[in-house]
Amino acid sequence: MQIRELAIPDSYEVTPVQRADDRGLFLEWYRFDLLEERIGHPLTLRQANTSVSKRGVVRGIHFADVPVGQAKYVTVTHGAVLDYIVDIRVGSPTFGQWDSVLLDDVDRRAAYLSEGLGHAFVALTEDATVSYLVSDVYRPQAEHGITPLDPAVGLTFPAEAGEPLLSPKDLEAPTLEEAERQGLLPSWEAVRAFYASLGEKVSR
């Protein structure tokens, strides 16, 4: 398994080793110990989610209040999506920037994003099936969104996705600037302190 940090600090692309024979193939798509070694603290799993999306569906940009936030480990079990990690941490050196990972059922990569980062994806195929391991349960009162069509963020969607299809909630979400003005965004300092506290729990 290879774990590569993305252009957005505290987010990673995970590429598993696939072992194939005449029966099919086998891979480890999640290893808690290897991930912990890379990010400096364990990923505590409290919920697992699956979504199935038509081609062109865009989900996000979603994020949760920190603390506790919601770290995500995301992979695709059928089809393909382009997964986006957006830095919404005010004061971060990459604030407002994003990186992306192609998640599909060929290379079977995963993406990990720490608490306080924004997450979105666009489905590139019909019935794109995305599975998420997350560090906390869904808490509606702590969940927020930024419109993925915000020109200031500038997410680009591949041509094969077709016309973007968004939920009313995501369409009506604020822009990054509006979310900052409303005090919805986490700060770089507070989020980094939260990451450090997760590592301190391990050493006690």
Image (spheres, grey):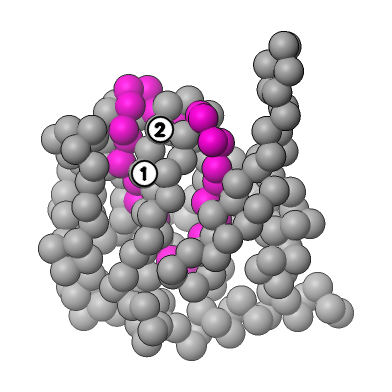
Image spot of residue 82 (x, y percent): 36, 44
Image spot of residue 84 (x, y percent): 37, 54
In what element is the residue under mark 1?
strand
Residue bounds of the magenta highlight: 105-129
Q: Which mark is residue 80?
A: 2
Image spot of residue 137 (x, y percent): 56, 51
- List the single residue furthest toward the front: 21
**Residue 95 position (above or below residue 11):** below
**Left or right of residue 50: residue 57:** left
Name which residue lies at 22% across and 66% down. Answer: 153
In three-dimensional space, the C-alpha distance between marks 1 and 2, rounded to whole angstroms, equals 7 Å
Amino acid type, mark 1: Leu
Disc 1, disc 2: CB below 8 Å? Answer: yes
Name which residue lies at 36% across and 78% down. Answer: 94
- List the single residue furthest toward the top: 22
Q: Nearer the viewer, residue 43 or 160?
A: 160
Instruction: Check residue 108 for magenta coloring.
Output: yes
Where does label 1 land, which residue?
Answer: 82
Amino acid type, mark 2: Ala
- Counting the numbered discs, the total is 2
Q: Which mark is residue 165?
A: none
Residue density around tag 2, few if under 14, some if 14–19, many if 20 or more, within 10 Å? many
In what element is the residue under mark 2?
strand
Residue density around tag 1, few if under 14, some if 14–19, many if 20 or more, within 10 Å? some
Q: Nearer the viewer, residue 45 or 7?
A: 7
Observer able to see residue 72: no
